Image (spheres, grey):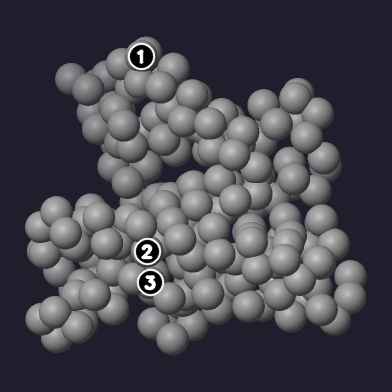
Amino acid sequence: MTGKDIVFILIAYLLGGICSGYYLVRCVDGTDVREQGSGGVGARNVGRLLGRPGFVFTLLGDGLKGVLAVMLARSFGIAAPAVSLALVAVIAGHVWPPQLQFRGGRGISTAIGAYLAYDPWLALLLLGIVAVLMGCRRGFILSGLAAFLVLPPVAYVLDFPGHTVAALAGASAIILFAHRERLRQVFGEAQAQREA
């Protein structure tokens, strides 16, 4: 890995740290969105505070930085494995933004944007897996998280490069970690229903 590769991975991480929902709420009403609602900086929480315009702005802003990180890395000709690492880095930056004391979002919009720029088939596969899981009567959030978990082995079976599969696995691990409280809640509710 060259110095240029490392620089662009770092740029992707810092770009990921620009949490659009946090700055939007800060500009509109001067508050910290992390202290309100669900405590997240993502589109759902911003939408609760600022309505549909806030939701759309945050969704697009977070997705766009995923697109931009991958496109920048490719446009400057860094090695393919380093582009894969930039994909992981932009998601990590969104979840752990250094300027926000490492308290950011949960990474889904940023990941989808990065997947679209990296290979649109990955984004389509992800959405297809979500649709199948929702057809099995799983909730939207649980289906989405399960789709991130299933995507790396599917990509492996479809013969994507090893560095791509590894990047998808890394991204999935970050996203699942960011949603750990939600997962505990879901599994806690399921356990309570079984015991009832």
Q: Which mark is residue 23?
A: none
Q: Is residue 38 left or right of residue 58?
A: left
On the image, the x and y values in percent for residue 85 come to 72, 61
The answer, for residue 106, to whether it is visible in the render is no
* Precedes in sequence: disc 2 or disc 1: 2
Between 152 and 66, the residue placed more toward the observer is 66
- CB under 8 Å between discs 3 and 2: no
Q: Secondary structure at mark 2?
A: helix
Is label 2 or label 1 in front?
A: 2
Between 108 and 37, the residue placed more toward the observer is 108
- CB under 8 Å between discs 2 and 1: no
Q: How many marks?
A: 3
From the image, tell me which residue sits under label 2.
Answer: 61
From the image, tell me which residue sits under label 3.
Answer: 19
Q: Is residue 156 left or right of residue 189?
A: right
- Which residue is the extreme one toward the top? 136
Q: Amino acid at mark 3?
A: Cys
On the image, the x and y values in percent for residue 142 come to 37, 33
Q: Residue at x 45, y 61 (%)?
A: 64
* Precedes in sequence: disc 3 or disc 1: 3
- Which residue is the extreme one toward the right? 1
From the image, tell me which residue sits under label 1.
Answer: 135
Assign the C terminus to one quadrant of the image.
top left
As displayed, is residue 14 above or below residue 137? below
Q: Amino acid at mark 1?
A: Gly
Rendering quarter of residue 168: top right
